[in-house]
Every structure is written in C-alpha cells, then in structure tokens.
Amino acid sequence: MAGVSVQAFRRQGRRFGAGLVCSEMVSCAGIAHGNEKTLGYLRVASDEHPLAIQIFGSEPRVMGEAARMVESVGADLVDINFGCPVKKVTKTGAGATLLDEPHRACAIVEAVAQAVDLPVSVKMRRGLRDGARTCLDVGPRLVEVGAATLTLHPRSAQQMYTGTADHALTAELVSLVDVPVIASGDIVSRARAQAVLAATGAAAVMVGRGAQGNPWVLREIVDGDGRDPTREEVVAELVVFVRETVRELGERRASGFLKKFYGWYLGRGRFPKQFKQELVVLDSTAEVERRLLAAAPGAMPLLEQLEDERGESDEMLLDLPISIYGGG
Ligand SMILES: Cc1cc2nc3c(=O)[nH]c(=O)nc-3n(C[C@H](O)[C@H](O)[C@H](O)COP(=O)(O)O)c2cc1C
C-alpha cells in the first residue's frame, strides 16, 4: 500500500505471520532515471523475505528494465500494478487504465517476464467502471504471456475504496486460469479469510487496510489466535514501529508519515480518542514515545524484548545504504 507499506510495516507483517509481503508501488520511470527518491523504495532487509516489489508504468521496455533492478536488489517476486485508480497514475497510462488496454498490458507482462528469472505477478482491479468484468478477459491473457500469479481486488477503479469487494468475480477468475489467484479486498478477520477462500477457491488472501495499526489480525488469520492485544502490547509495537520508521525515513519525514498510524494503533477502543489528538501535535517522535510509555508503563519490558529479538537483523540492516526514501 502506497504511503503505508514501508519496510517497518513489512517486517512487522512477517513477524506476525504474513507469508509474503509487498512493497509500496514503485515508479518504473523513477527507477529508469535513477531517481534517488524512487531508489529508496528498493531497500530490502534480510528479514522481509519473501518480499514482492511492485512496479507501475506504461512502457513495456522501461518496465522490463525496472524489473531487472528489482531482481538485482534481491526481491523474491516482481509485481505489476494494474489496479491503481489514482488520477496522478492513470493519466500517465499506468495502473488500472491498462485493464482497458489489453495489448499494452500483455506487452508489459511479457517484457517483464522476459527480463527476469523471478516469478512475475499482476495485481488488478475488476475494471475501470462500476460493474466491469474486464479482469476476466484480461487475466487469462496475462497468464498466457507470463504472469505466474494474479491478485484480484474486485472493485472497479471508479469505486476507489467504496462499496464492497465482489469476490464472486474472484471465483470466476479462479475457474479461468491455472495459476494461483490471490484474493484482495475486505479481508479483516479469520472468518472472512476462510469464507473467501472457500467461496472462491483462491490460493491465498491478501490483507491490506485490516493490518494498518493491527498486525494482530495477521496472527488471528494465520493461527486462529484471536486474542485482542493488551494496551501494553499495542504501545510496545507502536514504539518499535516509530523507531524503525524514523531510521528508515529520517525524523522529519517520519514524524508526518506516522501521524495516521497513531489513530490506527490507538483506535479500536484501545485508548481514549483524545490521546491520539495529543500525539499528533507533538513536535518529535521522541516525545511521542515518551507519552506512549507514560500511558502504559508496563510496555517497557515488552519493548525491550522486541528490541532484543530484532537486534540481530538490525545489525544486518545497518550494512545497507541509508534510506533515501522520498515518499509517495
Ligand atoms: C492507502 C492505500 C494504498 C494502496 N496502495 C496500493 C499499491 O500501491 N498497490 C496496489 O496494488 N494496491 C494498493 N492498494 C490496494 C490494496 O492493495 C488492496 O487491494 C485494497 O485496499 C483492498 O484490500 P483491503 O480491503 O484489504 O484493504 C492500496 C490501498 C490503500 C488503502
């Protein structure tokens, strides 16, 4: 998820049981131009694997080159974005608009599949307009030219994130292709995951918004452990997330980026509403951390334990170039 799936989010997802995590979408033009900001997205930590890096663009040759770069930085899978509904992306001929340009979409997948040895996956929406069934036409064609798996978010681009994901379409897509299909959209609990898997025959589910500020849902989905986290667990996890994000983005950028996460972590009845309001106006993340630990002093031992556990992989992280992530 653009603006969400930073490395800290992905590493956390892995710790809580996600079988595969994915980067934010990365512009292939940005990669081709060696744009420093874009290259910051291609930073892979040793404990993220298996990791997919998602690229978007509209030129098959440039997408192929970007895929090579994705392979060289150590991703396990290249994912292609045919789902982004945002104007800034669709007006360049990338994202969901490619569903209405099947020739170009196929040329992109073919170029990417030929460029790399990694498996190539495609993430798509149902189509551009409400009620569209374009994914059922385009999906099988993408498989023919090299897509090793398809992820379907069965909303239209027009819908953005309104309404519900129509997983009847996911079931239809599963019946049309002989590669694994991943179901994306409104998977917010184990019960929902099981229902969608059973109804569609999909090989896996993808969890997006449900995991924002709530990695515990991954544990629930994977292990059936539906325990709500204690306030101490929430605070310890959030403090680790804050620290890692600061290391990744730098203090200035992280402090803005993190604000939305405070509501996600502290909501769900976990803390009074005004506590989040207090945090978002603080000047530094160190101050945020102090306030969080003051609200749940019992979080300290949990935090120390989490820091100990991730100590070793952090050593490896320090060997990597300092993040030059630029946002998105
Ligand atoms: C803030 C945000 C950013 C997203 N960015 C991407 C993206 O970069 N690439 C992508 O394929 N999907 C992106 N998505 C779509 C999600 O991957 C997912 O398909 C969609 O949110 C439905 O799943 P959910 O109900 O589990 O969130 C984004 C969704 C949100 C809410």
Image: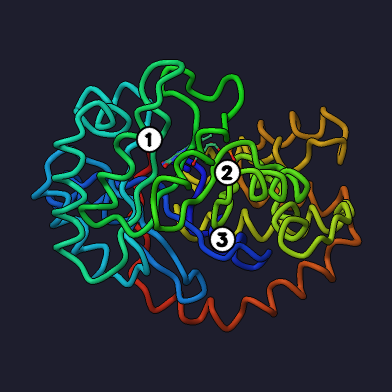
Residue pictured at 48% horizontal, 47% vertical: 174
State the residue lying farthest toward the left. 61
First in residue order: circle 1 vs circle 2: 1
The yes-or-no answer for disc 2 within 8 Å of ligand 1 is yes
Say which residue label 2 marks. 208
On residue 244, which mark appears?
Answer: 3
Residue placed most toward the observer, 85 or 145 = 145
Residue placed most toward the observer, 139 or 309 = 139
On residue 292, which mark appears?
Answer: none
Q: Which amino acid does label 2 sit on?
A: Gly
Left-right relation of 46 to 231: left
The local crowd at label 2, few if under 14, some if 14 to 19, many if 20 or more residues have their Cα within 10 Å, is some
Q: Which amino acid does label 1 sit on?
A: Leu
Above or below 6: residue 47:
below
| Residue 310 x, y percent position in the rendering | 63, 76
On residue 136, which mark appears?
Answer: 1
The local crowd at label 3, few if under 14, some if 14 to 19, many if 20 or more residues have their Cα within 10 Å, is some
Q: Quadrant of residue 53?
A: bottom left
Assign a secondary structure to mark 3: helix
Residue pictured at 87% horizontal, 48% vertical: 295
Above or below 214: residue 303:
below
Circle nearer the viewer, 3 or 1: 1
First in residue order: circle 3 vs circle 2: 2
